[in-house]
Image (cartoon, helix red, strand yellow):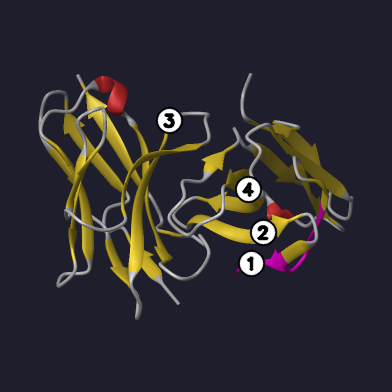
Amino acid sequence: AQSVTQLDSQVPVFEEAPVELRCNYSSSVSVYLFWYVQYPNQGLQLLLKYLSGSTLVESINGFEAEFNKSQTSFHLRKPSVHISDTAEYFCAVSAANAGNMLTFGGGTRLMVKP
Amino acid sequence: DADVTQTPRNRITKTGKRIMLECSQTKGHDRMYWYRQDPGLGLRLIYYSFDVKDINKGEISDGYSVSRQAQAKFSLSLESAIPNQTALYFCATSERGGSDTQYFGPGTRLTVL
């Protein structure tokens, strides 16, 4: 079985400041890693995912995440946040042979202040 | 139009009532999922279906049942609602393959009094 821990339930940050949302996972098998974002009153949508290859993956809106196998981490970063990045962010993992069953972390609420 | 729709969007009901939440998708995906979201717990899987004839229990299926009426429709029922089933419920879909993105509906906020 897999598990995911998001170490911060809330992260307040000022606009244009950098941010890191932390995610650690536990699994005895190879995994795929995902970050989903939930904007207020909406469903979740994929932000980025790591499947294989380069350990650094990027989204179209400036976020990036790095897969660190030795640390079992997949932290999400953005060098300069905008008000519109205010949302809840979920890290998720699926075992590579488990047919797309996702295990989610508890979520981190990013609050960007002007 | 949205690819994954859920009805109703909000529902308030009383303890002991039977409730059905419906999900429809136009993405043509075989796989569909029902999750519940609770603050601090993230999303937890209730049931999933890999095709019309394949339905499986997830992590927290007790108190819930599902029906896959067609490839595009997947309904979640609460046979006898209780207050701790108050939550935000999401339906999702994906194509075959463990690495595939899941596409979520807008959610149903259910309150059981």
Residue under label 4: B87
Which of the 4 quarters of the picture holds residue A82? top left
Residue at mark 3: chain: A
**Gap between marks 2 and 3, in whole Å?**
24 Å
User: Which chain letter goes with mark 2?
Assistant: B
Q: Is disc 3 placed on a helix, strand or loop?
A: loop
Q: Chain of mark 1?
A: B
Q: Position of residue B33 (x, y in %)?
A: 64, 52
For the point 30% across and 21% down, which residue is it?
A: A84
- Distance CA(mark 2)–CA(mark 4): 18 Å
Residue bounds of the magenta highlight? B56-67
Query: Foreground: A47 or A6?
Result: A47
Residue A21 visible from this viewpoint: no
Q: Which residue is mark 1?
A: B58
The local crowd at label 1, few if under 14, some if 14 to 19, many if 20 or more residues have their Cα within 10 Å, is some
Are discs 1 and 2 both within one chain? yes
Q: How far apart are the two marked residues, 1 and 2, measured between alpha carbons?
A: 7 Å
Could you confirm whether marks 4 and 3 are on the same chain? Answer: no
Residue shown at 34%/81% (left/top)? A28
Given the image, what chain letter belongs to the residue carrying mark 4? B
Alpha carbons under labels 4 and 3: distance apart: 17 Å
For marks 2 and 3, give the one nearer the viewer: 2
A12 to A68, vertically: above or below: above
Residue indicated by mark 3: A39
* Amino acid found under the numbered disc labelled 2: Tyr
Q: In percent of the image, x 20 and y 53: which residue is there?
A: A75
Locate the N terminus of chain A and report the quarter of the image it occupies.
bottom left
**Which amino acid, by three-letter code, is at mark 3?**
Tyr
Residue A109 left/right relative to B98: left
